[in-house]
Image: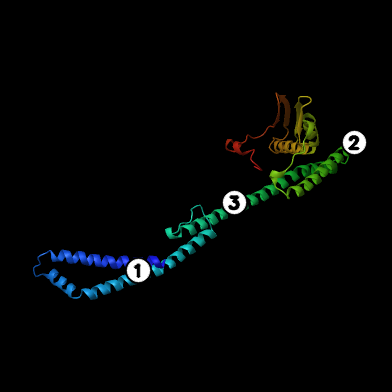
């Protein structure tokens, strides 16, 4: 920087002498008549040394101030850049050309801050998803437990066989609730993407029939019925707990949005290498603007 300062002074002084030389050469080749310009040039000629010294002094002061204030300008730029780093945006940081290397480093830091902010936001979203996931899935078996216990309370004349059956289903659902809680303790150590499927060969027809049977209490609350129509021996390799949770949620939604006193029809049939499963209920139609979102997570 000191070298640039000396060079600027030398260029300025050289420019002054060059202008003086050109002016002198031009004035000597002109025939002057007495006038204000002529007298002014005569005055300059008499005081040329003083004028040159004054111009050199003024130039030295200006150049010195410029070089002295430049670090302050750089400092102001760095302060502004630091404020942008505190709240990084999409726009990159811009500094003077002389600070290009500093600009590059600051932009690297800015990009790292943006990535960290995005990761923190994603982590927060995963935590929120997990909470909703937990509440949604715990509600399903809990609703069944409450439904069957309510039946047992409100129908004291129920037969021992039905009482034993309802008690057994309520106990199964309560144990399922305990399994879910234990599972969520495991999930919280990872995230939703780390769930491992425990696959085995299972009969979809039997699973759907058991689902409808265990949902009797919830169906009865809205005076609904549920019919099952499936092909025989619909075998699939899958995680029985996860599939049961999916089908249970579908049936709960069908129940929630069915007209009272209607039937929910569940069908399952094989089609080449696929199994097609449908849950059909009678209720208000889903608004067209919501159809594209109904299978988004927790919608």
| Mark 1–mark 3 distance (CA, rounded to whole Å) | 47 Å
Q: Label 1's element?
A: helix
Q: Is residue 92 left or right of residue 15?
A: right
Decide if residue 179 is in sight here: yes
Tell which circle, 2 or 3, labels the residue nearer the N-terminal end: 3
Label 1 environment density (alpha carbons within 10 Å; few <14, some 14–19, many ≥20): some
Q: Is residue 46 left or right of residue 104?
A: left
| Mark 2–mark 3 distance (CA, rounded to whole Å) | 58 Å
59 or 182: nearer the viewer: 59
Q: Mark 3 points at which residue?
A: 118
Q: Which mark is residue 63?
A: 1
**Measured along the vertical axis of the image, is residue 65 above or below residue 89?**
below
| Mark 1–mark 2 distance (CA, rounded to whole Å) | 104 Å
Query: Nearer the viewer's eye, disc 2 or disc 3?
Result: 3
Q: Where is residue 99 in the image (x, y as percent from the top left)?
A: 45, 60
Residue at image x 55%, y 56%? 109
Q: Where is residue 255 in the image (x, y as percent from the top left)?
A: 72, 37
Residue at image x 79%, y 38%? 217
Q: Mark 2 points at which residue?
A: 161
Q: Label 3's element?
A: helix
Q: Label 2's element?
A: helix
Q: Position of residue 275 (x, y in %)?
A: 71, 28
Q: Position of residue 158 (x, y in %)?
A: 88, 38
Decide if residue 222 is in sight here: no
């Amino acid at each position: 920087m000191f070298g640039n300062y000396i060079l600027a002074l030398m260029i300025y002084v050289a420019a002054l002498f060059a202008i003086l030389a050109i002016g002198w050469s031009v004035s000597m080749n002109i025939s002057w008549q007495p006038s204000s310009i002529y007298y002014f040039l005569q005055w300059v000629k008499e005081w040329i040394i003083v004028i040159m010294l004054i111009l050199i002094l003024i130039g030295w002061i200006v150049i010195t101030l410029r070089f002295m204030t430049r670090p302050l300008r750089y400092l102001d730029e760095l302060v502004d850049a630091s404020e942008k780093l505190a709240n990084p945006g999409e726009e990159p940081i811009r500094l003077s050309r002389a600070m290009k290397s500093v600009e590059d480093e600051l932009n690297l830091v800015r990009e790292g801050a943006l990535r960290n902010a995005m990761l923190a936001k994603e982590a927060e979203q995963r935590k929120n998803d997990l909470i909703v996931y937990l509440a949604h899935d715990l509600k399903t078996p809990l609703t069944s437990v409450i439904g069957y216990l309510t039946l047992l309370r409100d129908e004291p004349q129920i037969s021992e066989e039905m009482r034993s059956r309802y008690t057994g289903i309520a106990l199964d659902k309560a144990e399922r609730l305990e399994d879910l809680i234990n599972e969520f303790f495991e999930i919280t150590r990872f995230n939703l993407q780390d769930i491992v499927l425990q696959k085995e060969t299972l009969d979809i027809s039997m699973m759907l029939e058991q689902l409808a049977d265990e949902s009797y209490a919830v169906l009865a609350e809205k005076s609904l019925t549920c019919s099952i129509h499936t092909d025989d021996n619909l075998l699939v390799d899958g995680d029985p707990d996860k599939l049961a949770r999916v089908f249970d949620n579908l049936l709960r939604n069908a129940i929630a949005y069915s007209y009272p006193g209607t039937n929910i029809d569940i069908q399952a049939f094989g089609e080449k290498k696929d199994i097609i499963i449908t849950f059909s209920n009678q209720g208000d139609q889903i608004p067209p603007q919501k159809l594209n979102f109904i299978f988004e997570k927790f919608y």
